[in-house]
Amino acid sequence: MKKLGKFATPSFKDADPLWYKDAVIYQVHVKSFFDKNNDGVGDFVGLMEKLDYIAELGVTAIWLLPFYPSPRRDDGYDISAYRAVHEEYGTLSDLKRLIEAAHRRDIRVITELVINHTSDQHPWFQKARASKPGSAARDYYVWSDNDHKYDGTRIIFLDTEKSNWTWDPVAGAYYWHRFYSHQPDLNFDNPRVLQEVLGVMRFWLDLGVDGLRLDAVPYLIEREGTNNENLPETHAILKQIRAAMDAHAPGRMLLAEANQWPEDAQQYFGDGDECHMSFHFPLMPRMYMAIAQEDRFPISDIMRQTPAVPEACQWAIFLRNHDELTLEMVTDSERDYLWETYAADRRARLNLGIRRRLAPLLEHDRRRIELMNGLLFSMPGTPVIYYGDEIGMGDNIHLGDRDGVRTPMQWSPDRNGGFSRVDPAQLVLPPIMDPIYGYQAVNVEAQAADAHSLLNWTRRMLAVRKRHRSFGRGSLRFLYPGNRKVLAYLRELTDAEGRDETILCVYNLSRIAQAVELDLSAFEHRIPVDLVGGSPFPPVGQLPYMLTLPPYAFYWFSLATEAALPSWRIQPSEPLPEFATLVMRNGLSDLLNRETRAILETESLPNYLARRRWFAAKDRKITSATLGRADIVGNETAGVLLAEVNVEVGGSVQTYQVPLAVSWDDMPSNPMVQQLALARIRHHRRVGYLTDAFAIDALPRNIIAGLKARTTLAVSDGEIKFLPTSQIDELEDMKEAEIRRFSAEQSNSSMIVGDTAVIKVLRRIEGGIHPETEMTRFLTEAGYANTPALLGEVVRVDAEGVGHTLIVAQRFVRNQGDAWQWTLDTVSRAVDTAIHTELDEAGEADAMAGYLPFAAD
Ligand SMILES: OC[C@H]1O[C@H](O[C@H]2O[C@H](CO)[C@@H](O)[C@H](O)[C@H]2O)[C@H](O)[C@@H](O)[C@@H]1O
């Protein structure tokens, strides 16, 4: 065989040694993934060909099931040679090329280190059974004269094995095995065994593998009077394995397969000196339990029982894998419940578990599949996805052992699901062909082309996950809302630069829509931003935060400190400030006398301006606010004071229009009068508010009336002109029209009058022809119909004849939003479709079809 030499992984040389914390792992069976040479069995070259598919899914590591020489009586976990590959999968060189190809795509490769046992065909066992008792060769395995030794040990493969001892006629002794009788356990009390294992480990590390899954690791050592699981001596072995790995190839990773209760599984991290990762077996069945019982308790309870892990360590979490859905780490009553719920058909039961895939377990219910994946991608730990579950593959409970969940990957509706071109009778396992899950209905090709498929949904969710390190590294904090059908938790992380990220995850575990009130008061003023779509939700306050969730729905929010407020949101009314009371003897002109003007300029206007969205310098200190101009339009008590305020901020002066009016308490008014008030006002016994005239309904009506009448008003140093377009004459009478005000505007203040006209009060006032009215006036008079017609404008013309546009009136056009937002939404949908569905040119044109004519106009 060609010498492979020491493998270096250049692309990962400077990588973060904790890479496995941010990883998403994809578990693949070489045998069942893609058969490139069409002999009926998947191979390394086939897998290599599908690496782009794996990369596009968004995973960062692949975990390969055993591919070593083996009689395959336990699907490869019965290894007969440790430093070679099964000839049906290819050659060692093929594997090396596969690893290099994965690395080029930034995908790590995790392989199996099955050291608890070998196949009985392994030369070590063949030699051991033929050697004398007590000899070095015999001592590689665990022997006994009787089958009563270690009596307190459970049998794992209950459906097949009656004892952990099997008589070997050649050796004339019983040998110990925790799994099938053809899988004798290695004897780790023999130091030579450990040395052999370390040699095997170095061999694969040299070949370039990035991580090793330690199969069945709790059972390495046996001691009389114990249950022979998790023994301190086993941990001592693991510490030696870890030390050898760190010395030989730092930056690689050990993953413990310890199907144990949390406190025991956690022991496989040691003090950070055993495995880097360990599977969280008890969490997995409790996720199924939670949606079956529609109660968050199974999840929150097991996570509370889970001890903290050392800094550099990480749980691996999963929904399904190549084995039966193991129910070893649940109580007897919980197991009965899960069996009844998920394996009513007894053929689905195997040992202490259920041999079904994710989609059939969840009855093909897309909402539950998404919910469970949502949990998988957001609970603490590194998610492991089982091949085929990303397209919702089914299973075959009529196949033996666990083969029913190891069937060929379904690539297309072609022969054998696109897995192999071979005669179907020669396939390593039959593909799924039933009407619901068969490869005609469920396959990669179809789902890649469907933007709404499970495959594309999974890709999108993994892309979201990748953007937020808190999912892989953050702490976990449960919220306990009164509604137990809702599971809510926070994932929080402070990064090396001191930046905080808080992600709120909320799940409706029930088949019925739910409302929930969350205590988020610690995050007051934060804005929950939906991580998937990017839409901001209303800000968090002191009161419980209410959410409603459709059946099995979930949200991931970032609790953002800075984010755009949703455009549709109406500002909650602020508590009213302590207004000064201005005294009016005669009318509006009194506001301009020295005392009152001083209160307005030093108190009322600065306070008012600082709270306005349209005031450009709201975050800065106002040096002064002086009334520049103030012209009374209309009568002294019911008219408008057209005021322009010069505001000095940081050495520069900006002019804002603040039209003022009085709303008397004994007159009908709307809540906005108070919200936009600057001061209280008293005229003899009559009291009211001095408010922004924008809040007074008479303002827009008088503007329309003024435009219709083509009014010109004389004011100090000039005149105010109402300049209509020809459209104004077609406008009906607006005296009774309903007035609606926009709440989300940033720069000006607009209102809709009777669904007919829009009146915009401009705030920043500048001299010269206003570009908006200049353009819309031209288009309107030219008869252009694709922009709202200009009705007119109100312009103050100063002594020099320079116009200052104060107010703009346009036709109202019923709409579903503005063109900018529509453009953004269309482009983002088209990009999304293009990314996820491999569009050809025609498909790309389709995705933009509705938009292009508009853009071309
Ligand atoms: O190599 C023997 C077995 O080792 C792993 O087994 C694990 O799977 C069992 C369920 O099938 C589980 O009950 C046990 O606790 C685990 O160690 C491996 O994943 C199996 O495929 C293999 O048969």
Image: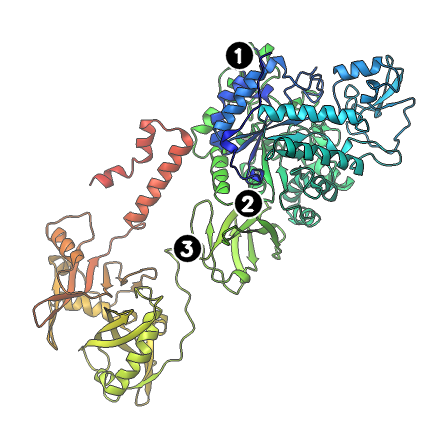
What whole-number distance in Å separates the C-alpha atoms at marks 1 and 2? 40 Å
Scheme by which the image is coloured: rainbow
* Disc 3 CB within 8 Å of nearest ligand 1 atom: no
The residue at which mark 2 appears reads as 471
Is disc 3 placed on a helix, strand or loop? Answer: loop
Q: What amino acid is found at the position of numbered circle 1 in the picture?
A: Asn
The quadrant in which the N terminus is found is top right
Q: Residues within 10 Å of mark 3 (few under 14, many from 20)?
A: some
Q: Earlier in the sequence, mark 1 or mark 2?
A: 1
Q: Position of residue 575 (x, y in %)?
A: 43, 73
Question: Residue visible at 52% across and 45% down?
Answer: 469
User: Image height check: is 53 above or below 628?
Assistant: above
Residue at figure coordinates x 20%, y 70% from the top left: 702
Q: Which mark is residue 37?
A: 1
Residue 552 visible? The answer is no
Residue 2, given in percent of the width and then of the height, sits at 58, 13
Distance from the alpha carbon under mark 2 to that under mark 3 = 21 Å
| Residue 542 versus residue 100 in the image, above or below | below
Amino acid marked by disc 2: Phe
- On screen, residue 449 above or below 67: below
Please say whether residue 400 is visible from this viewpoint.
yes
Q: Residues within 10 Å of mark 1 (few under 14, many from 20)?
A: some
Which numbered disc flags the more N-terminal residue, 1 or 3? 1
Q: Give how far across and how far down residue 723 sits, in percent.
A: 12, 64
Q: Residues within 10 Å of mark 2 (few under 14, many from 20)?
A: many
The residue that mark 3 highlights is 563
Q: CA distance from mark 1 to mark 3?
A: 54 Å
Judging depth in this view, the residue of 167 and 722 nearest the camera is: 167
Question: Which amino acid lies under the numbered mark 3 shown in the image of this protein?
Answer: Ala
Q: Quadrant of residue 651?
A: bottom left
